[in-house]
Amino acid sequence: MTNQKPNLILINCDDLGYGDLGVYGSELHNTPCLDNLANQGRRFTDFYMASPVCSPSRGAMLTGCYPPRIGFARFNDDWVLFPGDAEGLNPNEYTLGDLFKEAGYSTMTIGKWHCGDQPEFLPTRHGFDQYYGLPYSNDMAPMELRPDMPPLPLMHNEEILEEQPDQTGLTERYVEKSITFIRENRNNPFFLYLAHMHVHLPLYAAAPFVKKSKNGDYGACVEAIDWATSVLIHELEKLNLLENTIIVFTSDNGSRNDYGPNNGPLRGTKATTWEGGMRVPFIVYWKDNIDPAVCDGLISSIDLLPSFASMLGIKMPSDRKIDGINQIDYLLGKSEKSNRDTFYYYMCDNLEAIRYKNWKLHVSRRPGAGKPTGDFGDQNQDYEEAKNNYEVKELYDLSKDIGETNNLYLKEKNVVIALMEIVNQAREELGDRFTGKAGKDIRSVGIVENPKPLTEYDENHPYIISLYDRNEAG
């Protein structure tokens, strides 16, 4: 080993479903590298992102907080941030980048950021030495469905390298930049946050993967993620760094249910608070340092920040509330028991469900949820009109009913009463739009004056628009 401190590579996919990897049950996708990491590391069955949509999910993972805590519950009535928005991750928030930087690590974000595209919100303002990638979703670009969008920028740090890059080769470019970063820091501890654009629509799969895929472009994109991971593993082995590098793999939320994805046995899709929206694959691999195991304890992305702070011996800021729990022993196999027994399912600023141990209680559901296709409903639908119709009464025993099909609400009244106490506590602390609760200890989202998109559409520029109309955006 060249370092005493372990390196960390955090791989975060976009819209990858619970059942999209072979080791999580896929019979269509060939993912030998990720399957191997899971089988030789720790594979988690009950890992949750803190939001079923992108910006809130990513902000929560970086800060160890539920999205409402950091002002990431809603963005001008949109679910996620858009190009040129005045809002973003507050520069005063303490992130994974800040943590590893404080511990003396070299830090880099590669790929999708989506926590604000104004300079004040970029990774370089949140503890990362370098940034290379797309500042938001790959569909936020000029195309038939969104003709007025500014050109999609590929960025290095805070500069624009290219407009409308050919996304079919972008994963390879991300891998190349990752390898360069690893080589440059082979003698220093490093933290690499690699945020793939796959498998968000539109799908841009390189031809070699399409030819081999049994599931069209979607399967090709999943297998490109596996390939990218295998290249990084090979490089770490070549540099004699694999035994000193923790690799964490996950997805920002569940998948859609059209265009080929698979949430396995879970009900629901991204943008819903059924299990399929927020329970995602999660793998921790550290060669020769942790024993293989399948872990079924409750754990969340918001636990990563306090867990790695504990590993590094760094004290978390004492001037703010952090929702995450130190789970480092559970993550690395020093304990087989999770420290978490409760989880809140927020969709934007609405508390829709809570989990306590094996019980899950649904209390509300946004208008438009549960569509049979990828139509997630109208983001700007008037919630005031739905105030009298938001409430749902559903109770599921996830230990026996992972698909949430057998509603026990009327049969388990004592359980409902106990869980409603947790619901009320969550609403008081973090707020709830439907019930009019404002929440406590809520911090402000970052806001800048006079925001503007990073790029401007030029009708005379020969953008390759056809490359941006592979599939419906979403």
Image: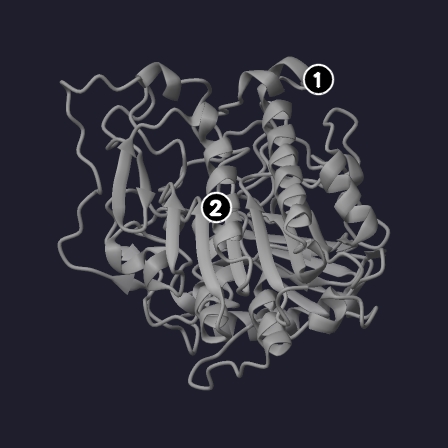
**Circle 2: is it few (<14), some (14-19), or many (20+) Cα within 10 Å?**
few
Quarter of the image for residue 254 reads top right
| Residue at x 68%, y 59% (from the top left corner) | 361
Under tag 1, what secondary structure? Answer: loop
Tell me the number on the disc at residue 251.
Answer: none
Under tag 2, what secondary structure? Answer: helix
| Residue at x 86%, y 51% (from the top left corner) | 400
Q: Residue 272's spot in the image, x, y percent?
A: 57, 45
Query: Which quadrant holds the C terminus?
Result: top left
Position of residue 226 relative to residue 85, above or below, is above
Q: Residue 11's spot in the image, x, y percent?
A: 58, 49
The kind of residue tagged 1 is Lys
Query: Which quadrant holds the N terminus?
Result: bottom right
| Residue at x 33%, y 55% (from the top left corner) | 122
| Residue at x 80%, y 72% (from the top left corner) | 334
Q: Considering depth in this image, is 377 or 464 the residue closer to the camera?
A: 464
Total numbered labels: 2
Judge left or right: residue 119 versus residue 206: left
Position of residue 381 relative to residue 335, above or below, is above
The kind of residue tagged 2 is Thr
Q: Earlier in the sequence, mark 1 or mark 2?
A: 2
Q: Which residue is mark 1?
A: 214
Q: Which residue is mark 2?
A: 180
Quarter of the image for residue 426 reads bottom right
Work out which residue is located at the far bottom of the displayed protein and give it. 318
